[in-house]
Image (cartoon, helix red, strand yellow):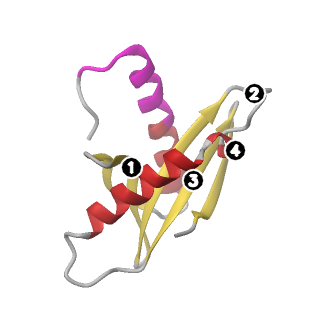
Amino acid sequence: MWPTRLSQKQEQGRKWEEAAMAYLRRHGIVLIEANFRCKLGEIDLIVRDGATLVFVEVRQRAAGAPVDAATSIGPAKIRRIVRAAQTYLQRFRQMPPCRIDVIAINGNDIEWLRNAIQV
C-alpha cells in the first residue's frame, strides 16, 4: 500500500493518510488504492463511497497554523489532483460516478469535505 522506504516527511504524511483512512472506514468507506502516482500528479487515497469512486486529498496542519489544512490546497495542487484523477479514470470503459474530497486535519481535528474540488 505505502512505499517501504520513506523520508521523515513521507513517514509523517503516511501517518496522516492512515489516520484519514481509519476515519473514512468508520464511515463505511472502502480503500481502493493509496498513493496513486502518475507523471501528471498524485492522489493520496482512492476510495469507494457506495457506488461513487472518490479521490481523496489528505492535508494536515498543526493546530493554530496561519493557514488551515483545506485552505493550503492551492490552484497548482488542484490541477495536479484533477490530472491524476483523469489519468486514473482512463482505465474504465464507462466513467463511474466520482468526486474529489479533502480530509483536512488541523491539529487533531479531522474534517471530511465532500466534493471539495469540483471540475
Q: Work out whether residue 84 or residue 12 is closer to the camera in this orientation and state it.
A: 84
Q: State left or right for residue 105 relative to residue 1.
A: right
Which callout, 2 or 4, points at the residue further toward the start of the chain? 2
Q: State left or right for residue 64 relative to residue 54.
A: right
Which residue bears the numbered disc 2?
A: 63
Which callout, 2 or 3, points at the residue further toward the start of the chain? 2
Label 3 to label 1: alpha-carbon separation: 11 Å
Looking at the picture, does residue 10 appear above or below residue 20?
above
Which callout, 2 or 1, points at the residue further toward the start of the chain? 1
Which residue bears the numbered disc 3?
A: 102
Q: Find the magenta span and give its range.
A: 5-16
Q: Measuring 46% from the left and 39% from the top, which residue is drawn there?
A: 17
Which callout, 3 or 1, points at the residue further toward the start of the chain? 1
Q: Measuring 63% from the left and 45% from the top, which residue is drawn there?
A: 104
Which residue bears the numbered disc 1?
A: 43
In magenta segment, residue 7 = yes
**Of helix, strand and loop, which one carries label 4?**
helix
Residue 18, x across and y down, in percent: 44, 39
